[in-house]
Image (cartoon, rainbow, N blue to C red):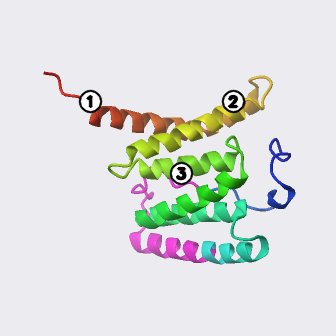
Amino acid sequence: MATATVIPPMFRRRAGATRSVVAPTDMEDSGGLDPLRKRAFLTQGRDLLNEAMRMFTAASGADHPDVANLLNGLAANYRAAGMTAEAEDRYRQALSIKARFLPPDNRDRIIGEWSLGDLLATRPGLEAEARSRLRAAMAGAMESQARFRTFDAAASNELRSYAPVFATSIRVAWRLSLTSAVPAR
């Protein structure tokens, strides 16, 4: 609601449209789900997400923020299935759409930056880009806090919901500090 005046009317969220989906950081912890069942669930989910994307693209166009959210969900599915390259491609597509239409403090854009940053943090050599993405997500989260006049329960809940963004950023910064440390002479 706070950003409704910023988003053009044709890009405002429809009732029932889903939020962005973020893959958990630790995908190996599947809670004891049988690997064959997990693979079947992921394949079924991917099919459903692709079908939803076809429908949303036909109705709203390929550059709609809801299509970006579906791309984010598809990327999370690929990531859970261990298909990192496909996940990265979908996260990048989703974020490019979100960056064109959503302000930096929009929750979907923050989640998009964090999703891509979190994935890049797991890929050797991409930590610097991960840090950049995570910093953008943190800046958006802090900017979104400016919507609250006082630090009330709503502001506290909003900030708490962004905890993974900050935690991932600290993890990446720590890893970068270890790899870029110059040995003492």
Q: CA distance from mark 3 to mark 2?
A: 22 Å
Q: What residue would you read off at disc 2?
A: 156
Q: What residue would you read off at disc 1?
A: 181
Magenta span contains residue 60: no
Where is residue 128, by image quadrant? top left
Residue 107 appears in the picture as rendered: yes
Where is residue 11, by image quadrant? bottom right
Judge by depth and name the residue closer to the eye, 35 or 76. Answer: 76
Nearer the camera: disc 2 or disc 1: 1
The earlier-in-sequence mark between 2 and 1 is 2
Amino acid type for the residue under numbered disc 3: Ser
Amino acid type for the residue under numbered disc 2: Ser
Q: CA distance from mark 3 to mark 1?
A: 27 Å
Is residue 32 left or right of 6 when viewed as pictured?
A: left
Amino acid type for the residue under numbered disc 1: Ala
The earlier-in-sequence mark between 3 and 1 is 3
Q: CA distance from mark 2 to mark 1?
A: 36 Å
Local secondary structure at mark 1: loop
Q: What residue would you read off at disc 3?
A: 115
Query: Mark 3 and 2 residues: CB-CB less than 8 Å, in contact?
Result: no
How many neighbours does mark 2 have within 10 angstroms: few (below 14), some (14-19), or many (20 or more)? few
Residue 96: image x %, image y %?
61, 57
Which residues, given as a range, are shown in magenta? 22-48
